[in-house]
Each structure stands twice: as C-alpha cells, then as structure tokens.
Image: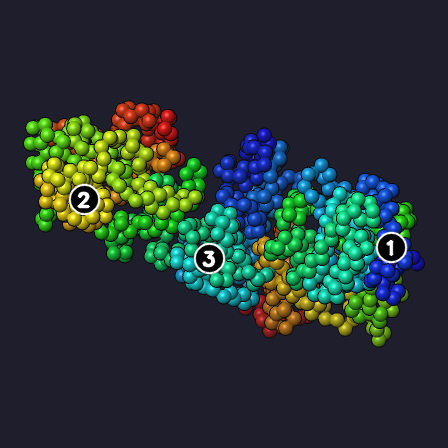
C-alpha cells in the first residue's frame, strides 16, 4: 500500500531539508506557484476529496474557497497543531519526522488562499516538535523556501511557530485564534466564521497538520490519484493512532474506509494475552464508544457518523474485557471537567457535576437516583453550549452510560434506600 | 427592515437587531444574565435560548440576528425546559446563601428560579469551594466568588465602558473565579456600577451592604445634583423603618437609564453623595441664637426690606442665588428680586473653583442647573462685587442661597459682612461655616424633597420628583421666597412647581412649549440658539 504522509518516516534524518529535497521536496510548491492559479489549486484539492483530518472532516478545498478574496484585509493560514485529544498522537510524528512536508503544504495553501503569513500553533507540551519545526522553518528561510520572493517566484510568505500553553480547548479553532492573539483560550460565538473574521479580525483558514501535509502529494500526483485511495467522499489515507489494549500500539497510515477490525487485529496485532475486546473509542475521547459488534465499521467520516459515533481525530483507544467501564467513563468525565474552559454555564458546571457524579458511583457512594439522574444531566450539556466541547461531553460520556448500563447499575450502593434522597 | 414574529406578535426592526432586542421592543421578557444592552454580547450564560422555526437547535436570543420572516418562540416547552436546565447548572456550585446575601430580593437567580426553575434539587455532590467571600476588591465593592455565575458583565464593563480593565476570570472549568488582576484594585470613578449590573450577589456595595433589605425600599426618580451632567438616578429610601438607620431615610442612589445623558451609569461621587439629605440639616428658622417660627423669620426680613422698597433703595439689597436651585426656585427668586425689588443686586455666578472632571460623566461645574440659571436669571452683575459692597456697608440686606461664602471668600470677609449689613440671610438645606455668621438661617429642602427641574450642561431640562416630605421645618426654596413676596404685598400665587414651570415656559423663550408631561423621564433640550 502506498504511503503518503508517512512516506519519509523511518528514513534517516527525515526532518532535515536535504533529506526532504532528495524526494522531490518542494517541487509541488514550485509547480503550484509557477504553473497553477490559486483557484486551480483549490479546485484540485476539492476534487481530491481531502477532508479536515483534525476531526471535523470538513472538505478542505471548500473551506479554502470561503476566503473572501475581495476583502482587502490580510489573509492568514493557521495550522492547528494543538494535538490534545486523548488517544491522538499523529501530528506529533509529522512535526518530528517530516516538518518540511508541512511547510510545503503551507506554502501551497497560502498561495491558494492569497495569504502571506502562516502560524503553526503547536501543543506546548510537544517540546521536540517545537524544536524540529522551528529548525525546519529556519532551514527553509535560509534556502528561500520561506521569506521574500520564494524560489524566485515573487511570492512572499512568513511562517511563525507558536507554542500553546496547555489548554485542550485551544485545539478548538476559535479558542486557538484567541490564544494566538494573546487572550485566554475561549471559543468564539459563531458566526462569523474564521474564513470571514478570523485571526486579528482577518479572513483565516485553520487546518490540521496532517491535512496540510497531504497537500503536496495531491499537487504532485493529482486529485484523482488521491481520491481513489480512500472511500467515497473521503479521499486518501488517514493516520490512525492505536492505543490501549493492543499488541502493537502506534500510528498506522491506512486508507480511509479500512475497517476497525482490520486496524485492531491485522495492523495493531490484536488484543494481548488472548483477552477479548470489550469497547473501542474510534476517534479520540470525544467520539462515542463502540462495542465489539460494531467492529466492521469502515473508518471514514460518513460511515462512523452513520452508526452514531465519529471518525474524529483518528485516535483509536482499545479496551479489553478487564476494563471497568464505569472507571473508563470516570476518566473521560474527569478529562472533560478538567479541560472545560469555563466560559459558558452548561459545560462549565455540567462537566464537573457529571464527573463528581460518576466518581461517587465508581467509589460506591452513589444512590439509585444518582444513576437515574446521570443521563439527563449529561444530555443537558450538549446542544446548549458555545462550542462543540459540550456536545463531546454529552456524546462521549453518554455513550458509556447507555452501552454499559449494567456495569453502572452494579456500582450503585444498594444500602442507600431510595427514601434517603 | 426585517419583519418577524415572536410568540405570535409581529414586529418590524432594523437589520442587525438581535432577537432579544426585538423581544424587548415587544415587551416580551426573555431571561438574561450575561446580556446587557450597554455591553458587548458574550453569550455565555445560555439562559436566553429561544426556539427559531426551521433551526434544529435552540438559539441564544442575545446574539442571533433577526431575519425577515423569522418565527421565534420564547415560551415553548423546549425553551422552558432548557431554562430550567441552565438555572440548575448555574446553581450547581452556587452557595444559595440567600438569607445572608445582600442581593436577596433583587437577585436574578431568585427571580428566575421562581419564574422558570421550581425543580427539585438533584445535586448530591459537594460544591466547588472558591477562594474569596466578603472580600473587598476596592474601596466600594465586595466580591463573593462562590455566588458569581461568571456572566462577565463586570469584566466587560471595565474593559469597554471605563476601559480600566480591572477584572478577569481566572482558572478553568468549574474552578473559574472572577477576580481583579493581581496587584489591582477596583478603584475607578465608576466602580459602583458593577454592583448594579451584577445580576447576582457576587458584587455588593460596601456602603449599602446589610443596611437595609431591598424590599423595604421605596424608589423615587430623580436627577443627581452633584454636577452639571445631571445623570438620571433613583433615590431609594426606607419608607417604613428610618429609625433603623439613625433616622436616615435615603439608603442608596442608583443610576436610572437615560440614553441621552448617562445611559445606565453614574459616577461614584454621585452615587455616594446622599448623606447630606439626612445629615447636618438646618432644621428650623433661626435668628442669631434663637429658634423662631417661619412667620417671625419672614417678618424679620420684611422689617429690613420694606423700608428699602418704600424708599426705592433697592441697590442696598443683595441676593446670591445658586445654580444648584431648580428652575422653579430660580424663577420665583427672579420674580421677587428682579421684578418686585427691581434694582436689587442679584447674581448667582459666585467665583467657584472648577471641580474634578473626566471624559465621561463627571463635569467640572458642580452645579446641576447652571444652564437653567443663565436663562432664568441673566445678570450683568458680579457676585464677587456684591460681596465686596456688602463688606463696605453699601448693602443692608444680603440674601444668600446655599453658598458657603467662607469657603469662597474667606472667613474675614464673611465676618466683615456680618458687621456691615443690617440683615445677613442664609437660606439653605445644610449647615456650613457661613451659617454661623448669618443673622438669619432659613432651612430649605434638598433635591430629594423637591419637585422641579434642572437644566444640565447639554441644555436638557430634566425633572426631579419629591421622595418624601421636607425634613423638620424646612421648606422648598421657592415656597420660602413666595412667603416673603406675599408679605411684601406681591403674592406669586403658584400652587405647585408645575404651575411655575408653565409660567417659565410662557415667559422665557428657551423654555417655550415645554411642560412636565413632555419633559417626562428623558428630558427636553432648551431651544436654540444657545442649545
């Protein structure tokens, strides 16, 4: 199978410019800048069915086309590398092993949308990523792949590497913009969407690292080639991060639409010690949990959506039959309570309430009505919040309670009489 | 202009109007915590969610712009259910310490719970403990973090209205806490306003705390007399139990919305400038050291005035009215001193030093009615000259309205006046140093006891309403002067201030066609050319 994003992984010094140049490096950027118009680039990306690989799956070319070209303000490209979704560790590999692929993608994207400045927002804990990307940026400036009149084309582009400060919510694109502007990471009310009013009030495209790393191969080899690799409406490959109870955890590049079963049992080596699979989170902790009967789902945005979950960030967390699902729900709820930004009331108060409720349940201090109330409390958060974080709490935590109800019921402390409440 | 339907009622509003603004226009009250019409929209409390036809999710009314043909429901079962839900969330970590909370009775958590909540508590968990309770964040405001619902109205006030940026929300999730930035205090000219806009008991007024439960308060519309801006206020006073407060009636002043003057705000100087209403008042007419009756007091003045009037020596009469009096007071003073006693030396323009000022509401001229006084009592005289003549024995009767001459001209000058004139009359509401030199002290009422109008620095004529009866024996300034006129044989014959105002409107061109009804709550600007 043909590798795209991981094609340089494992080659020595793959993060260095000289290595990148050996494999036709920056030729896609040269092709775009010298042989194509911005609109042609956008069309090519549209045809490739490349979709946002940060988790939302929005068609990338379409997103670029929303940038109002008549707007006299500067346009910005922001790379969302605040990879904080538990179970997700793919962008880290691109940062560390092929940063020039990202930079080349940035050049092409900026050219397509008429931007001359890009920001790479990197999760603050990713020290090595920050170092590698900054070093790559420095190399690219020196070799005139970045800066003024790059590659003799007259196109100017500046790239700034910006470290995050440790809040999960800054991976939400508008909170990221706030953070980049030096403010507290609070998601913005929408509309306006960033394409119209984004960074510093200017039209802005925000894309995930992996998405942009896919752009140079698309320009080199064409949209049709890329579209054929994946499933219908979801072109190309995807990096799947497999963790939890598997023999070979790691990042796997596989075509969109590969089944979850194949990923777990063929690529990640199956469940250790002959145990059985009990549950899988298919796309980062925000994605509703799946049960063994759902393993034949195709791993692409539309297929996962159709069974009530989501492809999300590609973070697959596998749990075997030794896992206490109330404990797993508590860990998820604790994460959400800890990372809720606190801006709007349902999520701020609800996420903590849900966590404390499940925590009591787990520790055997819950009364029957606590479990009775839990689904309602969880449901009241989603749909009522400023950003999708609240929806994630509802969908994710709610799915444990629904699918593993009996485990929750077993934890209720029967000594508390109903009348006690 | 978009035309929409809210709860079955049709309304047309300009493009860009939000649902909550359109609903307000219709008188449909959508609950709100974070939304405030004078502040940028934050959209964080989520209680204003409404149902919009053809939209799958509920929308926040404070942020969603109306569109033509939109159909909005603010009271559908879905909306009512979400309101309950939001209230429940807001109360998860709220202490519900209403019995010891100063906000009780005017708290939006209480109000909306009674209106939209009324659920049984489902909470079985320990609440998040927050750091600061009853904590002074500045000289005038106390913070209680656990009562705060993090609506950020105060943050946005300090960021956008005063631009002083004292507030921030610190930490994350349900550990978020409102606070002032480290090393900062809430100490700007408008600090007190954050208490007014705080919908809950998180920010309370140090001055008002625990003085009076709000349900004992009566509210009277008025205008701040502290400077020439004439900010609209409400005088809030304890009508039933003044004995609780050493007989003080007024408990606090609050800003009253007037988009043309002060919007929703008042300065702290104005806010806390109410003690003089109940303290340090002149209570009885007093001749030298003797308390006398009003009849005796008027007779004392007449005994000096009559001979001067009869002998046409009006130039030996001096009067110093004040730009802090109402238009009505000044008009009656004009009637007496410039018509009946034509030739008397009258001028209100005493040499005052300009006071503090800022670019927002605080004006250097500390008189609430200079613009009115200039129209009603124009004078080519000079108050300072009148004072000088009084020290030189060229004046027999000096009639001072409220001015503290000691502060303005020095003690020696005032001592000299007391020696040189036959009768030195001080008419005012509060005791000042000049009183001890005046031969005759006449107690007049304060603005909160008066009906009348002030004309602010924009030339806007604004009404004040009497909250309560004049204290002790004090009387309205125009009533005292009317008594004097009557005794001099030229009765004014006005029953109330409204009649006086009608007379002003008929006499003075700048006030033409005005009347109390037209002035109403928002005021009316003087006619051109000056205004």
Dot 1 corresponds to which residue?
A25
Residue A112 vs residue A116, the one in the foreground: A116
Residue at mark 2 to residue at mark 3: CA–CA distance: 41 Å
Task: Kindly identify which chain the residue marked by label 1 belongs to.
Answer: A
- Badge 3 local density, few (<14 within 10 Å), some, or many (20+)? many
Q: Are marks 1 and 2 in contact (CB under 8 Å)?
A: no
Percent across and percent down for residue A143 are 81, 55
Residue A230 vs residue B433, the one in the foreground: B433
Task: Kindly identify which chain the residue marked by label 3 belongs to.
Answer: B
Marks 1 and 2: same chain? Answer: no
Location of residue B66 with respect to B160 vertically, above or below = above
| Residue B96 seen from this side | no
Dot 2 corresponds to which residue?
B443
Residue B205 vs residue A150, the one in the foreground: A150
Dot 3 corresponds to which residue?
B202
Task: Kindly identify which chain the residue marked by label 2 belongs to.
Answer: B
Residue in the image at 63% along x and 64% along y: A338
| Residue A182 seen from this side | yes
Residue at mark 1 to residue at mark 2: CA–CA distance: 94 Å
- Badge 2 local density, few (<14 within 10 Å), some, or many (20+)? many
């Amino acid at each position: 199978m043909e590798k795209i994003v991981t094609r340089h992984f494992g080659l020595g010094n793959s993060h260095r410019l000289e290595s990148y140049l050996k494999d036709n490096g920056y030729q896609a950027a040269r092709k775009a800048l010298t042989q194509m118009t911005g609109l042609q680039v956008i069309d090519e990306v549209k045809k490739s069915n490349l979709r946002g690989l940060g988790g939302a799956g929005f068609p990338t070319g379409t997103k670029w086309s929303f940038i109002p070209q008549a707007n006299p303000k500067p346009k910005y490209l922001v790379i969302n590398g605040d990879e904080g979704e538990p179970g997700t560790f793919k962008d880290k590999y691109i940062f560390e092993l092929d940063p020039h692929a990202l930079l080349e993608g940035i050049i092409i994207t900026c050219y397509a949308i008429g931007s001359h400045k890009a920001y790479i927002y990197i999760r603050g804990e990713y020290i090595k990523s920050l170092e590698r990307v900054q070093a790559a940026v420095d190399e690219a400036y020196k070799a005139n792949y970045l800066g003024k009149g790059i590659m003799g084309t007259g196109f100017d582009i500046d790239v700034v590497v910006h470290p995050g400060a440790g809040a999960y919510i800054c991976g939400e694109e508008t909170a990221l913009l706030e953070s980049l502007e030096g403010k507290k990471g609070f998601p913005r009310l929408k509309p306006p969407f960033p394409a119209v009013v984004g960074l510093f009030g200017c039209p802005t495209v925000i894309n995930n690292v992996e998405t942009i790393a896919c752009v140079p191969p698309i320009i080199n080899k064409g949209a049709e080639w890329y579209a054929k690799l994946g499933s219908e409406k979801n072109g190309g490959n995807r990096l799947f991060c497999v963790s939890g109870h598997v023999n070979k955890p790691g990042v796997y590049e596989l075509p969109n639409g590969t089944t979850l079963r194949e990923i777990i049992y063929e690529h990640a080596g199956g469940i250790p010690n002959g145990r059985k699979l009990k549950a899988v989170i298919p796309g980062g902790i925000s994605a509703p949990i799946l049960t063994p009967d759902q393993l034949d789902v195709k791993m692409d945005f539309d297929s996962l959506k159709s069974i009530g979950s989501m492809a999300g960030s590609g973070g697959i967390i596998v749990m075997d039959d030794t896992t206490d699902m109330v404990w797993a729900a508590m860990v998820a709820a604790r994460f959400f309570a800890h990372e809720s930004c606190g801006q709007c009331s349902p999520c701020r108060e609800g996420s903590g309430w849900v966590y404390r409720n499940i925590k009591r349940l787990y520790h055997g201090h819950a009364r029957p009505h606590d479990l009775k109330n839990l689904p309602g409390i969880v449901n009241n958060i989603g749909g009522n919040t400023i950003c999708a974080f609240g929806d994630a709490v509802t969908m994710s935590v709610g799915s444990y309670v629904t699918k593993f109800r009996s485990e929750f019921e077993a934890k209720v402390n029967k000594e508390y009489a109903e009348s006690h409440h | 202009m978009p035309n929409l339907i809210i709860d079955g009622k049709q309304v047309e509003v300009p493009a860009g109007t939000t649902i909550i603004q359109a609903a307000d226009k219709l008188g449909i009250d959508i609950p709100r915590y974070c939304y405030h019409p004078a502040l940028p929209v934050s959209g964080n409390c989520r209680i204003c969610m409404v149902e919009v036809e053809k939209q799958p999710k509920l929308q926040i009314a404070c942020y969603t712009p109306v569109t033509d043909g939109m159909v909005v429901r603010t009271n559908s079962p879905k909306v009512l259910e979400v309101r309950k839900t939001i209230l429940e969330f807001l109360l998860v970590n709220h202490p519900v310490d209403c019995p010891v909370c100063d906000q009780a009775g005017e708290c939006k958590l209480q109000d909306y719970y009674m209106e939209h909540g009324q659920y049984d508590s489902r909470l079985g968990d320990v609440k998040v403990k927050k750091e600061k309770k009853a904590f002074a964040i500045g000289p005038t405001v106390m913070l209680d973090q656990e009562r705060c619902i993090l609506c950020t109205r105060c943050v946005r006030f300090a960021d956008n209205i005063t631009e002083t940026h004292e507030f921030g929300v610190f930490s994350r999730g349900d550990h978020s806490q409102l606070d002032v930035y480290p090393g900062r205090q809430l100490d700007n000219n408008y600090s007190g306003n954050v208490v007014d806009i705080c919908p809950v008991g998180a920010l309370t007024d140090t001055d008002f705390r625990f003085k009076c439960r709000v349900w004992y308060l009566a509210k009277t519309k008025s205008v701040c007399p502290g400077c020439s801006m004439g900010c609209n206020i409400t005088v809030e006073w304890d009508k039933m139990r003044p004995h609780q407060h050493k007989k003080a009636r007024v408990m606090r002043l609050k800003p009253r919305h007037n988009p043309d003057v002060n919007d929703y705000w008042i300065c702290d100087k104005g806010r806390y400038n109410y003690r003089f209403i109940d303290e340090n008042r002149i209570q009885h007419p007093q001749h030298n050291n003797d308390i006398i009756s009003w009849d005796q007091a008027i007779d004392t003045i007449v005994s000096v005035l009559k001979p001067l009037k009869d002998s046409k020596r009006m130039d030996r009469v001096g009067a110093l009215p004040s730009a802090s009096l109402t238009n009505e007071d000044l008009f009656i003073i004009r009637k007496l001193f410039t018509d009946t006693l034509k030739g008397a030396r009258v001028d209100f323009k005493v040499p005052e030093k300009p006071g503090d000022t800022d670019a927002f509401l605080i004006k250097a001229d500390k008189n609430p009615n200079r613009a009115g006084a200039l129209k009603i009592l124009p004078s080519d005289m000079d108050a300072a000259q009148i004072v000088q003549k009084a020290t030189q024995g060229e004046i027999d009767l000096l009639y001072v309205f409220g001015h503290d001459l000691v502060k303005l001209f020095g003690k020696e000058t005032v001592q000299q006046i007391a020696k040189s004139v036959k009768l030195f009359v001080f008419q005012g509401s509060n005791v000042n140093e000049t009183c001890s030199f005046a031969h005759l002290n006449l107690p007049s009422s304060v603005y909160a006891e008066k009906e009348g109008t002030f004309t602010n620095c924009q030339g806007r004529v604004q009404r004040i309403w009497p909250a309560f009866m004049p204290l002790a024996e004090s009387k309205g300034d125009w009533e005292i002067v009317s008594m004097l006129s009557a005794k001099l044989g030229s009765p004014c014959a006005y029953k109330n201030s409204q009649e006086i105002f009608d007379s002003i409107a008929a006499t003075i061109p700048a006030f033409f066609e005005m009347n109390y009804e037209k002035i109403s709550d928002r005021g009316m600007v003087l006619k051109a050319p000056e205004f």
